[in-house]
Amino acid sequence: MAIEMPLVSIGLPVYNGESFVAEAIQCVLAQTFSNWELIICDNGSTDRTVTICRQFADRDTRIRVYQNARNMGVAFNFNEVFRLSRGQYFKWIAHDDLFAPEFVDVCLQVLETDRHVVMAFPRISYVDGSGRLLRRQVSDLSILGPTAESRVDRLTLLERQSTDIFWSLYGLIRRDVLEQTGLHGLYGGSDQVLLLDLVLLGCLKQVEKDLFFRREHPAAASVRQGGGWTAKDRARFAYSDDRRRLVFPYCRMLKEHLICILNSPLPFRARLRCTTAVLKRFMAQWKYFAEEAIRSPLDALQSQ
């Protein structure tokens, strides 16, 4: 008997997520679109995460659970769930976020209607640990320019305005396009480079429905990283085998953005315009470069 290949793959990388992971899996099970697979890859959890995930997998054959022998870092694990997937379309989910039953259906309709769109995602709402609404995304986040350089202009404008656009990576993405990118690099901030990679390849379209609920709570990675973590801590969070003594995350991100543009097949003038847009974006964050130039050497001395 031929095994039906899933049209949509959903990847759930997780580490010590026992408090919320069951809700995330329930969101997948509640989808109105049913031809999906859920790939869960545990990153060496020390709590009940794997037990909870396997209980779901035992009841639904569309769910597959894998375990890394040790915690390899979040970037590695995000790439791993994609590597293990098979669907024509792919979506990442975080263990502590929520999304509505129509999420996959609505985004899939966009992608199957317009080939120029490489990623579709809904409007974003922010909720607390109990799921209570904190705030809603305000501006439209679609990036629909007809050329790569116009899309990069739009992306860098959105990045200067807020962080909302970064969460669009939890949308639904064409597999063949995602395979052309560098995925998540094994360093902090590589999700931002991946977003640039996608924009160079096509349009990102936001649907006018509130279907994604980004949870903000004290244990969330985005909150913990702002609470006294050093640049080295953030680097090892992305990739646990990062043993660099000196870490300059913003310099690395700028370098990777420029390499991404340089490696694109765009003509020279288009690449020059994209480079200008990226430099303008990072120049607006000059304080972060100055801060890491001072803090990184101090952190290295303190860790000796």
Image: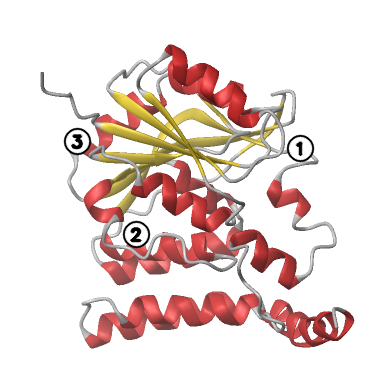
According to the picture, the residue beneath numbered tag 1 turns out to be: 217
Residue matched to label 2 = 198
Q: Which residue is at 53% across, 47% downward?
A: 68
Residue bearing the label numbered 3: 112
Tag 2: amino acid: Leu
Tell me the element at label 2: helix
Answer with mark 2 or mark 3, whichever residue precedes in sequence: 3
| Label 1: which secondary element | loop
> Residue placed at 46% from the left, 20% from the top?
57
Between discs 1 and 3, the one toward the N terminus? 3
Q: Distance between the residues labelled 1 and 3?
A: 35 Å
Q: The residue under label 3 is which amino acid type?
A: Glu
Q: Badge 1: how crowded within 10 Å, few (<14), some, or many (20+)?
A: some
Q: Which residue is drawn at 55% across and 25% down?
A: 53
The image position of residue 170, as x and y in percent, is: 47, 42
Three-letter code for the amino acid on which mark 1 is drawn: His
209 with respect to 299 (left or right): left
Where is residue 128? Give x, y as percent: 74, 31
Q: Distance between the residues labelled 2 and 1?
A: 29 Å
Q: In this view, does 235 lie above or below 254?
A: above
The quadrant in which residue 59 appears is top left
Q: For the view shown, which residue lies furthest in the left direction? A: 1
Evaluate if marks 2 and 3 touch, with contact meaning CB atoms under 8 Å apart. no
Q: In this view, does 11 lie to the left or right of 73?
A: left
Q: Quadrant of the N terminus?
A: top left
